[in-house]
Image (tube, grey):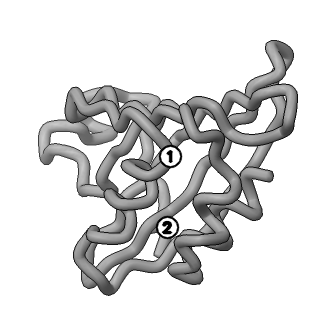
Amino acid sequence: KVRTYWAHVQARDWVAMRNCLSAQATMEWPCTNERFLDGDAIVRVNQIYPEGWAIKVISVDGMADKRVLSVVQVSQDSQVHFANSFWTFGPDGLITNVQEYWGAAEAPPSWRTPEAIGAYQRLPKQL
């Protein structure tokens, strides 16, 4: 269901996206202290987000507590963001809650170096 949801978002197929969500679905973005209180609001915030973005699903994994964890990369212009999302489902299989933790891909501060830390290396750029 989560891969299908992300595919609908990427396709801008808002009706199909909405059909993945229960009427009472909620979405939380703790990094910006926001909560969307129903399925329509979840669709709307995605629908009105400024255009030009592309979603790449990195992973979708079931968790022991029955939630699903997804990691997606969202590229827009020269920016890259990552969302770690925790999904909860109702008995009908529809999404009832998602908590998304968003972070930006950015260079580490200049003070983090192998000389200062020792056992440290910078990973290759993801793009």
Instruction: Name, please, the residue furthest toward the top.
Output: 65
**Badge 2 density bin: few <14, some 14–19, many ≥20, Cα 10 Å:** few
* Label located before the other in sequence (1 or 2): 1
Q: Secondary structure at mark 2?
A: loop
Q: Residue 44 location in percent, x, y?
A: 36, 60
Image side of residue 67 versus residue 14, left or right: right
Quarter of the image where one finds residue 32: top left
Q: Residue 33 location in percent, x, y?
A: 22, 27
Which residue appears at 45% of the width and 38% of the height? Answer: 38
Instruction: Name, please, the residue furthest toward the left.
Output: 110
Task: Work out whether residue 106 or residue 45 is closer to the camera in this orientation and state it.
Answer: 45
Which residue appears at 69% of the width and 28% of the height? Answer: 88
Image side of residue 119 versus residue 97, left or right: left
Question: Label 2 is placed on what type of residue?
Answer: Gln
Which residue appears at 47% of the width and 79% of the height? Answer: 54
Question: Label 1 is placed on what type of residue?
Answer: Gly
Image side of residue 85 versus residue 70, left or right: left
Mark 1 sits on what residue?
39
Mark 2 sits on what residue?
126
Whether residue 95 is situated above or below residue 107 in the rendered picture: above
Q: Residue 97 location in percent, x, y?
A: 57, 30
Whether residue 121 is situated above or below residue 101 in the rendered picture: below
Which residue appears at 45% of the width and 36% of the height? Answer: 27
- Marks 1 and 2 in Cβ contact (< 8 Å): no
Whether residue 126 is situated above or below residue 53 in the rendered picture: above
